[in-house]
Image (cartoon, helix red, strand yellow):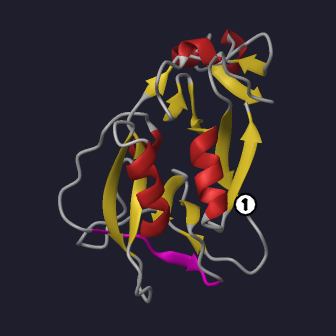
Amino acid sequence: MPGRYFKLSEDVQDGTWYLGDPVDEQGQEVEDPWQFRAGRPVSVSGRLTVPIDQQGRALDFSTAGVGLTPVVHVQVASVFSELAPDDVQFVPVCIKGMPDPYVILVATKCIPCVDERASAVQFWTAEDGLPEKVGTYYAVDDLHIDVKKVGTAKVFRTEGWNIALIVSEDIKLALERIRATGVRFTPV
């Protein structure tokens, strides 16, 4: 019997920091900030820095900038590394003023598992004026997945709606055990 899965997102609260898109060693924003949520390994040269766009209490799990790049404290990264080593990649980042190390968490798998019948799905149409997007997801509210299509993955993105970062129940429980801040889990 397949286990339970959850969408992991940032628990946005007043008083916490807001991180910007990663920048390279020259201070330029990375060309493709969405690459970190594409559900495939990334290739990054040089050290990246993640700016703090709004000061506040640091979180163990944040989504940075327009790309919603997952930035995690190394304690959170160690949970993923231990429980799902084949499903993740870590890109070290510098966050100015933070003595603890942080990394970008990249889910390296993208699985076609959105349960369109159980989810509230909207598709792009010809009337939207973007022919290259016709037939693809415009919005997926109340996301549900078909766990039979997941296989052994414990961390992944949903194909067609890669904004969703999905984690297995054992990862959820491990993050709750270490009292990771900034995490919100929604059953899918």
Q: Secondary structure at mark 1?
A: loop
Residue in view at x 47 percent, y 42 percent: 37
Position of 95 compared to 16: left or right?
Answer: left
In the displayed image of the protein, which residue is found farthest to the left? 45
Where is 150 relative to 66, above or below? Answer: above
Q: Nearer the viewer, residue 106 or 174?
A: 174
Q: Is residue 83 visible?
A: yes
Whole-percent x, y for residue 23 in the image: 35, 66
Residue extending furthest toward the front: 1
Look at the image and say whether residue 9 sits in the magenta stretch: no
How far across and down, in percent of the image, does residue 71 sit? 48, 61
Badge 1, how many Cα within 10 Å: few under 14, some, many 20+? some
Q: Is residue 17 left or right of residue 139?
A: left
Residue 33 visible within the image = no
Q: If the image is split into quadrants, where does the N terminus sit?
A: top right
Which amino acid type is shown beneath numbered disc 1? Asp
The stretch in magenta equals 48-56
Residue depicted at 52% across the width and 32% down the height: 157
The quadrant of the picture occupied by the C terminus is: top right
Residue 78 vertical position relative to residue 160 in the rendered view, above or below: below
Residue drawn at the location 52% of the way across and 23% of the way down: 159
Picture mark count: 1
* Residue 89 x %, y %: 33, 47
The quarter of the displayed image where residue 133 is located: top right
Residue highlighted by disc 1:
11
Compared with 64, 14 (above or below) is below
Question: Is-magenta flag for residue 50?
Answer: yes
Query: Which residue appears at 41% of the width and 59% of the height?
Result: 78
Residue 17 versus residue 106: which sits nearer the camera? 106
